[in-house]
Amino acid sequence: MTIAINQLSKEFDGFQALKKIDLQVRDEEFIAILGPSGCGKTTLLRLLAGFLSPSEGEIVIGNATVGNLQQTLPPERRNIGMVFQSFALWPHLNVEEHIRFPLMHHRFVSDAIKRKQHDRIKEVLQMIDLEAFADRMPNELSGGQKQRVALARAIAPQPELLLMDEPLSNLDAELRMEMRSEIQTLHQLTKATIVYVTHDQGEALAMADRIVVMNQGEIEQIGTPSQIYSKPISPFVARFVGKANLVEGDWNDNYFTPSLSPTTQWPDTGVVSEMKQRNIYPVRPEQFRMSADNQDESGLPGLINSVQFQGKEIHYTVQISNQTWTVHTDVSQQFSLGEQVYLHLFVPHNMEQKNLNHQAI
Amino acid sequence: MKNTSNTYKEIMPLRALSSLFKMRFLKIIALLAIILFFLIPVLRLVLLSFQVDNQMSLQNYADILQDSKTWTVLMDTILIVIGSTIISVTLGVFLAWLVAYTDIRAKKWMQVFIILPFVIPSYISTLAWTQFLGANGLYGKMISILPFSLEPINLYSMGGIIFVLGFSHYPLVYLLSVSVLRKVPREVEQAARVSGASGWRTFAKVTLPLALPGIASGGFLAFLANLDNFGIPAFLGIPAQIDVLSTYIYQQVVGFGPSAFQRAATFSVLLGIMALLGTLLQWLLLKKSKRLETTVEDKKPRVYLGKYRKFVELLLWSFFLISSLVPFVSMMMTSLLSAYGLDFTWENISLKNYQFVLDTSPKAKRAIGNSIQLALITTAIGVVIGTAFAYYRVRKPNRWNQFSEIAISLPYALPGTVMALSMIFAWMEPIPGWNPGIYGSVIILFIAYFTRFLILQVRGSITAVLQVDASMEEAAMVSGSNGLSKWRRILIPLLLPSILSGAFLVFLTALTELTVSSLLWSSNAETIGVVIFSFEQAGYTTYSTAFSSLIIALILFGFISLFLFQYLWNRKVANVK
């Protein structure tokens, strides 16, 4: 099911939570909405679900306008399923009853499923691997199992649009990794369009077909995970997704001079024009190399400010003049606190020097 | 994508238009009803206190303040309220500290005994205490056995009123203090100890200031309860000619002077001002203290009594036995006597008092019928309206329903005599010049109970709705269910246990109500409280104690049923195997 969001705004008591959002979602697409808390991502999801009505603009799901300034189609009349952050399981119903509930009430359940309700319940239980737990109550399930019941309830009526509100944030780190692949499998099985809200860039990068990065009620960038990661078009996206250092300086055609070191020249590794206009070179922590001596005199001198050993790599912060940059290196090279180092930009050998335009969507 | 577009075209424009209009309309109606039922009566009362011969005047106040009797009543009221509040706070905080922090055992059972004086109507407790400490009571028997002579205690005195009030209302202080004491994080106390403060200093400098909001709220509730209590000063004070504001207002109204209503209204405003002063004091106290951010109650003991534990437990249980059990046993003993004043021996025991109350006396029988009917109707209507309002208040908070909640809580916050008086003024002639006979029939009792006790249901239901996360409901909605099926299958099963607690409280309070009914009853419209009061005033102590014992049995039965129901329901919901 496609979604078209046109000039959508939402205001709460004078606070502008969403500012004229435009977004097109394709059929069967897995789209992640990524942003820090308070960026409006949950508001957008709740508008899609029908729990909120727009202050301006419109939402079209499929070919029906489900929300605009005058009217809002309530959630129970939309062909959707939803997974909540808190799971929202009903404490008085068991696993099987949770799956049966939407089969009985959802308006878009196909006749085939309605006729064979029992088979569908079994099928869904199989999909989430909880056949042996059909008559367990929510308080008898582990966190991961609860999450799977919440997923099962959402997909049981075969909705064409699946909304997920930070579904993994209540799980521990290991379980989160496991559930990522389960959600991907469910996406392939159900072929539903998925709108997935998260503040965890790892989740968004790992699962989504496209990512929408939001900040302060506005969309910063829309793109595939690799576009968002390696070609951020705004300082916010560079920092939030790639944890990039925003190095200030001057862009001249195809090289960059950091203002801290006027003699250094960095080649263009595909920085987008939006960043060039701002005279910023976004450098992700793993794009720096560090050396103890400055042989070719192209390194920026700095002092190691902190060292965090992470196992397969080491995270440093380096003080350069009055700025602090983050650098990740592998463990082959180790520096200690207070040591003088020189920073270089790592340029891959097969680097194409041309400027790639990001794909406008 | 199926035919959503059709559904949309058919339903949306109509739905959007009509619901918008209906909602607005309903809101206005609801708001008008709330103003009519909850605010106007109080306004009329205040207005009447400023009226003489339909003219605005301060004459009522001048008359009353020049009367020396007024000053005696005010002084007695202040003395009694301060004295009894000190008893309530001391007892409540001390017991709360013991239960919250020390390692004494059987805390749950102690809690039952602490709550007991609170759920039993205060006029029944008073009867019990008088039977226990009276000349023929167990106490009298006990001291007569002693080798030295002890004066019997006369409860029909200032001291007696202070004592019974203080003992009836300490549970309020206890309940609020115990939860706030448990919420004081033990780490902050440990931090004080590590910083070099002694145990006592830590309590005084850290624990007490942090627990102050709870203690002050409890103390304030006890203050209000002591101020507006009617049963205790009526049973103990009226025979001894000690008047407090609540009983004095009552006597003004039943005494029917030429200006009885104006005088009563003026006294009511004075009583209201005293209650407001108490609120102000509490507000000033609370303004300075910081609220605790912890929400979890830490129930593990912090103070280990060691070898003193057994001794403390023994003292506590003796206290509970003497304060919560023995008086009621004494009362039951009196109710079983064939004539008042006889010794409690086998040949003097009979059930004839019970037979009189349940069968012979038409007045008592009518009262039981009336009270049960009133309590049932009040509870049933309260559950529906109270829960609907609570749901709306929690899920869509706005300033209109905030205002409405304050309005709804007003009749309960007012002293009962004041509230009853305002009901008379509002409903005797709802429109000036038109008397539909509401006052003088059972209908005014129903209106009064409903307006006074609705807030109890609203509070209970608000707690219930708050416990159910909005996402539970949203999950039902995206599953395609809204309206009736959402309520039937999801909300009601989740809300019911807590709603029932509220409903039970309303039922119990309405069933045994005395203060409001004592001013609003009429012949054929008596209530249980009024009849017990009239038996006691006429000197039929065996009847009043028999009736009271019956009520206590009924209350205990109700509690056990509610407890069993909630236990079974929770077991069904939790499905504990």
Image (cartoon, grey):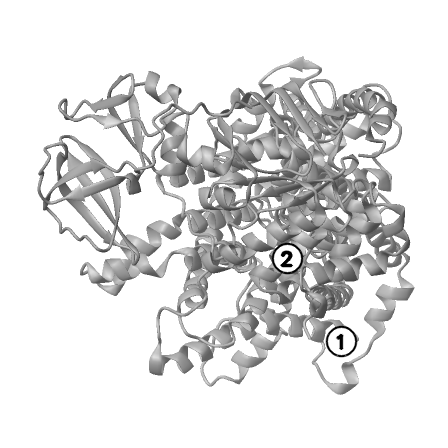
Q: In this rendering, which labeled residue sits more in front, label 1 or label 2?
A: 2
Query: Which residue is labeled 2 in the image?
Result: A148
Q: Say the numbered circle drawn on residue A90.
A: none
Name the one closer to the observer, A300 or B225: A300
Quadrant the C terminus of chain A occupies? top right
Marks 2 and 1: in contact by CB < 8 Å?
no
Residue appearing at x 71%, y 52% in the figure: A153
Amino acid under disc 1:
Leu
Q: Quadrant of residue A319?
A: top left
Residue appearing at x 60%, y 51% in the figure: A183
**Where in the figure is residue A181, as x and y percent of width and height?**
56, 54
**Where in the figure is residue B512, as x and y percent of width and height?**
73, 54
Residue appearing at x 51%, y 55% in the figure: A176
Amino acid under disc 2:
Arg
Name the one closer to the observer, A50 or B25: A50
**Where in the figure is residue B234, as x and y percent of width and height?**
64, 51
Does the rendering let one see residue B385? yes
**Where in the figure is residue B419, as x and y percent of width and height?**
68, 37
Query: Which residue is labeled 1 in the image?
Result: B337
Q: Chain of mark 1?
A: B
